[in-house]
Image: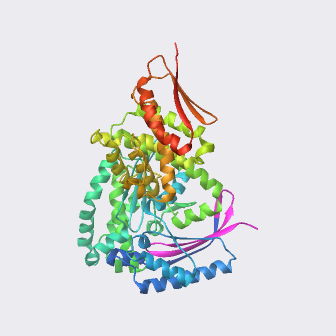
């Protein structure tokens, strides 16, 4: 019997049920139900989800659960995104859903949501698309943008705007079409300016995903290919010119969609019409993946999903390196410290119990630890802490950013302890991880404290209860030993292993 699973997702514009079966390196969707319910209108308009909307949502969820039982599917994931995440009464809403349906929804943070979908999209990109693409995930409340060049992510940005959020902001103008288009374009101008600075070289490809893209494909008579729609640029431009002079009611009647859908669709097309100007793309490639699709894939293809996650983390490292270059960090020094830190991490596997994700976080912490120096060398760890918490790093979610920021905060001589707000405010489960990574980072920094290429090579050996780091050089390492003796204290306190730095002379 084929393995099956289901996903129920509460999005801003709709509730979605997807049931799938495991197929060869893929997921076969055997049931897909979308029920329009714009909870995001409540959240973006009043700040809270109304209990009237909640009653309707619970009715829909219970109907979805009945469908899952009919299919005999017991493995079901429950996820909620922007509308629930940003609602001021989310705790009460989630509690009522749990009481009245018996299930608890996982509220996915913005970055986790984008990462989950983007990871799937990047795995499907063709080689040519990985060479030069502007990739946009258009959500109801947020937009995720990143640029891929030569197989690497060279920049990423998450913007707190989206089709539904904007249509709610300017609902008074929605029926005055020319006024609405103008006010939205003016509202988008600051975001456009930041995107212009962010996308410095126009990519060849323009790739989009989002809840409105299926409808846009239909309206443009897009050529469908597997899970993608190919929309010629001229077809999209013609659609934009056509709808910008029509009211939502007119769009609704012409394309047989609801007025609510027409409102958000019109806004989405205005946003995309501006973004495509940042590219030299001859066509727009639309991927149909949503958070429900990506979560279903994660459930049914766990091995492949884990591999995709590893591949996606490589984008996180390249994104961090581009940020370090932007803040004028020394790439050679970063590479030397990274190599030593990762060697220590790998030798300590049996003692730290950490995995690939944590290894990547250590690597990125090395890369970003000195970005605060662009502001000033005094307290640059504190400066970097606040910078990292507000940076967009491809492939890194909000929890991981908090971990990175804390590790970088303590990359100098300060020892983390509960009397310090940065450490005390971390979740208990995260504090030990931060200390483990800090301890390794401090050793690697001490070895390369002179910021000079002094060593032919560095080796790391774990022997019993001793970690021995050997620097091969003909030069003095007195400075490094001094720094090492100060910075090894946390390592020895965390792991109970004595760390030593030795020199081996070379000719």
Assess whether residue 10 is covered by the magenta stretch: yes
Determine whether, in the image, residue 163 is placed left or right of residue 122. left
Residue sitting nearer the eye, 250 or 6: 6
Residue 101 location in percent, x, y?
56, 82
Residue span colored magenta = 1-27
Q: Tell me the chief SS of the magenta region.
A: strand
Residue 174 location in percent, x, y?
29, 76
Residue 103 location in percent, x, y?
57, 77
Q: Is residue 443 visible?
A: yes
Identify the residue at horizontal 55%, vertical 36% (top origin). Answer: 498
Determine whether, in the image, residue 159 is placed left or right of residue 462. left
Quadrant position of the N terminus in the picture = bottom right
Q: Residue lying at the far top in this picture: please name it.
A: 507
Q: Which image quadrant for residue 158?
A: bottom left
Determine whether, in the image, residue 349 is placed left or right of residue 275. right
Identify the residue at horizontal 53%, vertical 83% (top origin). Answer: 99
Q: Which image quadrant for residue 48?
A: bottom left
């Amino acid at each position: 019997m084929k393995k099956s699973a289901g996903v129920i997702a509460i999005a801003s514009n709709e509730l979605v049920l997807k049931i799938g079966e495991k197929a060869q390196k893929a997921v076969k969707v055997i049931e897909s139900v979308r029920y329009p319910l714009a909870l995001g209108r409540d959240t973006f308009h009043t700040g809270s989800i109304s209990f009237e909307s909640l009653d309707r949502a619970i009715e829909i969820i219970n109907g979805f659960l009945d469908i899952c039982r009919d299919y005999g599917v017991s493995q079901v994931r429950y996820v909620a995104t922007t509308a629930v995440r940003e609602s001021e009464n989310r705790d009460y809403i989630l509690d009522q859903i749990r009481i009245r349906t018996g299930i608890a929804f996982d509220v996915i943070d913005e970055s986790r949501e984008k990462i989950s979908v983007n990871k799937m999209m990047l795995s499907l990109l063709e080689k040519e698309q990985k060479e030069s693409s502007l990739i946009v995930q258009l959500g109801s409340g947020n937009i995720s943008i990143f640029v891929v060049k030569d197989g690497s992510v060279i920049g990423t940005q998450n913007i707190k705007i989206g089709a539904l959020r904007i249509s709610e902001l300017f609902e008074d103008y929605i029926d005055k079409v020319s006024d609405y288009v103008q006010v939205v374009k003016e509202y988008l101008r600051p975001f456009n300016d930041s995107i212009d600075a962010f996308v410095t070289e126009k990519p060849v490809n323009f790739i989009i995903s989002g809840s409105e893209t299926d409808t846009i494909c239909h309206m443009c008579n897009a050529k469908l290919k597997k899970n993608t729609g190919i929309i010629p640029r001229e077809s999209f431009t013609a659609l934009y010119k056509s709808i910008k002079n029509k009211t939502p009611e007119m769009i609704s009647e012409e394309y047989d969609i609801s007025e609510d859908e027409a409102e958000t669709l019109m806004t989405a097309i205005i946003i995309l019409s501006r973004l495509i100007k940042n590219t030299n793309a001859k066509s727009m490639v639309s991927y149909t993946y949503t958070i429900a699709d990506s979560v279903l894939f994660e459930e049914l293809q766990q091995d492949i999903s884990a591999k995709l996650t590893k591949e996606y983390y490589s984008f996180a490292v390249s994104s961090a390196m581009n940020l370090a270059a932007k803040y004028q960090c020394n790439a050679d020094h970063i590479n030397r410290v990274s190599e030593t830190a990762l060697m220590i991490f790998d030798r300590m596997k049996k003692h730290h119990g950490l995995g690939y994700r944590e290894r990547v976080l250590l690597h990125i912490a090395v890369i970003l630890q000195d970005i605060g120096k662009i502001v000033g060398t005094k307290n640059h760890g504190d400066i970097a802490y606040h910078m990292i918490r507000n940076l967009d790093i491809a492939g890194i979610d909000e929890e991981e950013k908090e971990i990175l920021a804390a590790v970088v905060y303590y990359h100098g001589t300060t020892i983390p302890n509960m009397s310090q707000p940065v450490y005390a405010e971390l979740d208990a489960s995260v504090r030990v991880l931060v200390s483990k990574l800090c301890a390794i980072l401090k050793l690697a920094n001490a070895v390369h404290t002179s910021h000079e290429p002094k060593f032919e090579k560095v080796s790391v050996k774990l022997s019993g209860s001793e970690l021995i780091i050997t620097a091969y050089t003909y030069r003095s390492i007195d400075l490094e030993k001094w720094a090492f003796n100060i910075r090894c204290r946390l390592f020895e306190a965390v792991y109970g292993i004595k760390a030593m730095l030795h020199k081996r002379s070379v000719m």
